[in-house]
Amino acid sequence: MAANKVIDLIRNAGVVGAGGAGFPTHVKLDAEVDTLIANGAECEPLLEVDQQLMKYKAREFVSALADARELLGAKKAVIALKSKYKEEIASINKVLKDYQQIEIFEMENFYPAGDEQQIVYEVTGRIIPEGGIPLMVNTVVINIETLVNVNKALKGKNLTEKYLTINGEVKNPQTLKVPLGTSLKKIIDLAGGATVKDYKLIDGGPMMGKLVNIEDVVTKTTKGILVLPADHKIIIDRSVPIENDIRRSVSVCCQCRACTDVCPRNLLGHSLEPHMIMRGVAYGIDTDKDLFTQADLCCECGACDTWGCPMGLHPRSIIVEVKKQLAENGYRREDNPEVDSVHPMREYRQIPVSRLVSRLGIKEYDSHFPFSDKNVEIKRVELPLTQHIGAPASPVVKVGDLVKKGDLIAEIPADSLGANIHAAIDGKIKSLGKSIVIER
């Protein structure tokens, strides 16, 4: 199939990165590199989407990986996953005998192994420049679930469904497939309901996930929903107002630099020093722009919070707020300097996931779950027009229209970065706004 035809199919299907910020996949694959990495590390505790897709959907994602390698002109494709994924490795190896120029790279069980800057260094030995992307070192990184969606797109199937793990205080933790736009309340119901009365929800994993409401919905980047007691430490830490975090930082931070010592980006040799940002917040971002624009290098992994600070402060929250203020004031880093070498202690400061799970207080939820590929019947979906990096999609339907699952309902604005959105169920358009609501 011609390269432009492949790109068009992926673009038209609305495929974006299945986790993280949701970068449009048709843009990522419109390049030339020598190495393509399939990211199967899935370093967040309690989530198993990519692990289970590697086990149960190996043929689909490897086929898409081969197509993507050819599209990029890459000399090789590498499936990077943790060596502890024995069943997944066995499943993939059964498929790889039918493919060439694809290999497996086994990683240790450390956090955050799935950060694309970490995975590029582990696989290739190349250090991405500060604030840069894998393309700068002749590499592209793509998520396992994203590859499954690429495989569907190349068969003419638009993106209408999402795999996610529902875990925590629910009766039946599991990984399942649901229509995009499904309410989180329905997700909890599908898992048998909550096992505690007073709970909060996190969209994502316990380290990088965000607090969400039960009225929120599944989007293209939802990897998991964690149901935790309202008084769990993870919930309490996420609930601290930023004003309180700043006051505590100014008054309590002892400048021990433990947050910097465990920062994965600092250990890659990048000039990000969280303890210095913690020191500077008392004076405001106007006082030292060079210092505060370090914040743009942060991947928001939370290692500085959970594994670093002995005072119980939240450097990650401070840095996220600094990023926000930098954007509001139009401040940004001027360049992307290259990095010569990683920190000499990097190998010894990687965070063991098993110990991280204990420190987070989530060991009781850390087990393997059933995987279901069954279609779930949903009567109502709400599809946000922004489920990706870039401009919101523009509706191409009106209230009252009847649509079928897979129909285009919102498209990328002309010459804009973004992704198309398709009907996730058969039904009628009930409302338009920042989201499109469809009911059967």
Image: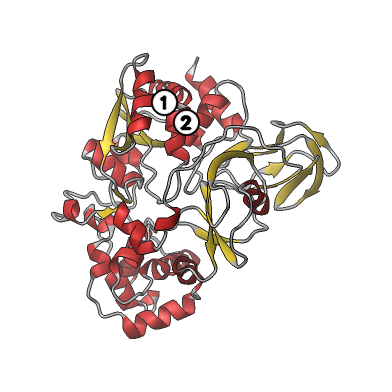
Q: Where is residue 89 drawn, in percent x and y?
A: 34, 29
Classify mark 1: helix, strand or loop.
helix
Number of marks in the rendered image? 2
Q: Where is residue 421 drawn, in percent x and y?
A: 65, 39
Relative to 67, does residue 111 appear above or below in the rendering? Answer: below
Q: Residue at x 34, y 52 (%)?
A: 131
Q: Residue at x 34, y 26 (%)?
A: 90
Label 1 neighbour load within 10 Å: few <14, some 14-19, many 20+: many
Q: Nearer the viewer, residue 230 or 62?
A: 230
Task: Tell me, yes or no, whether the two marked residues, 2 and 1, touch with CB atoms within 8 Å.
Answer: yes
Q: Which mark is residue 65?
A: 1
Classify mark 2: helix, strand or loop.
helix
> Most extreme residue toward the left, as rendered?
344
Distance Cα–Cα, label 2 vs label 1 = 6 Å
Q: Does any portion of residue 282 appear in the rendered image?
A: no
Q: Nearer the viewer, residue 188 or 317?
A: 188
> To which residue does mark 2 refer?
147
Q: Where is residue 172 drawn, in percent x and y?
A: 57, 47
Q: Amino acid at mark 2?
A: Leu
Q: In the figure, is residue 411 to the left or right of 82?
A: right
Q: Earlier in the sequence, mark 2 or mark 1?
A: 1
Label 2 neighbour load within 10 Å: few <14, some 14-19, many 20+: many
> Can you tell which quarter of the image residue 213 is in?
bottom right
Relative to 309, does residue 221 appear above or below in the rendering? Answer: above
> Most extreme residue toward the right, as rendered?
400
Q: Which mark is residue 342?
A: none
Quadrant in the picture for the C terminus? top right
Q: Where is residue 400 drawn, in percent x and y?
A: 86, 41
Relative to 104, does residue 280 appear above or below in the rendering? Answer: below
Q: Does any portion of residue 124 appear in the rendered image?
A: yes
Q: Residue at x 30, y 71 (%)?
A: 309
Q: Amino acid at mark 1?
A: Leu
